[in-house]
Amino acid sequence: MRNIIFFALLFVFSSFCFSTNLYHYQIDNAEKSFKEGNFSNSIEIYESLIKIEKVQDPYIYYNLSNAYYRNGDLGKAILNIEKAFKIAPRDKEIKNNMHFLYTVVGHNQERTLKDTFLKQFTLNEITILTSVLLVLFLCVLSLFIIRKILVVKHFVVFLVLVLFLCSCILVLKGCQEFTLKEAVILSSVSIRSGPGDNNPEIFTVSEGKLVHIVAQSGDWINIKFKSNRKDLSGWIRNSDVGNINE
């Protein structure tokens, strides 16, 4: 029995070491391809890590964005820098690259003040902070019930206010994550008045524009976005955008 457990643990450890070594080999190969100017191969490796091996690393998306940019695909470059920003919203290199790419395509993100604030934190960060504050509140409340110290009472009131604020932010962030579907226009496309090629074209949007997905009808989606502080909307094919939330 002990031998079986030993060999099982050895197998698990060996598999972990192999997968780790393979991961680093793929990263090294992607970086080497990028330096050699073989951006297509670099893109293929990074896409494989994300889609097949389900790697969710902001710097994989960051490097993939750089590879797409150098390969001349600005739409997918912006899509992947937005995905990197979603995972690591306060990383300076990611924020600088995102600003640079939006400058290149000539688009402003034009997010609301509330969305801009909420984008500075991940849902996990806010959830953990709220959970820690809740535990702290319960501990301090228990102490006040036992000792009846005035200073502790003031701290309890303070924690109630902070916990309420964090809870509100958590709700808003949850709504943003699960109801606000953001996407990026992958290439210049004509916006139509309805879902289907038989509907007239109303205007054109260039690649890299950040939009919100409002509804879907078959292969068509209804999008809305701001342009020069005006709210615009229309229909395009689902394949014309890259979903940031995916």
Image (tube, grey):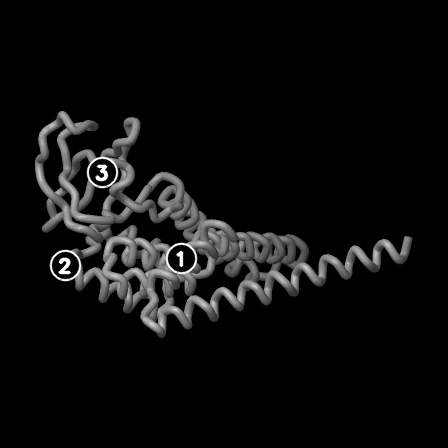
- The circle on residue 106 is 2
Which quadrant of the figure has residue 172? Answer: top left
Q: Is residue 204 above or below residue 115?
A: above
- The circle on residue 223 is 3
The residue labelled by disc 1 is 44
Q: Residue at x 34, y 60 (%)?
A: 40
Give whichever of 237, 110 is nearer the camera. Answer: 237
- The three-letter amino acid code for the residue at tag 3 is Ile
- The three-letter amino acid code for the residue at tag 2 is Gly
| Structural crowding at the residue carrying mark 2, measured as other residues with C-alpha within 10 Å and reported as few (<14), some (14–19) or many (≥20) | few
Asked if disc 3 and disc 1 are in contact, CB closer than 8 Å, the reply is: no
Q: Residue 136's x, y, as percent?
A: 58, 57
Which quadrant of the figure has residue 200? Answer: top left
The mark closer to the camera, 1 or 2, is 1
Q: CA distance from mark 3 to mark 2?
A: 19 Å
Secondary structure of the residue carrying numbered label 2: loop
Res 157 visible: no
Q: Quadrant of the C terminus?
A: top left
The residue furthest right is 1
- The three-letter amino acid code for the residue at tag 1 is Glu
Q: Residue 226's x, y, as percent?
A: 16, 46
Name which of mark 3 and mark 1 comes first in the sequence.
1
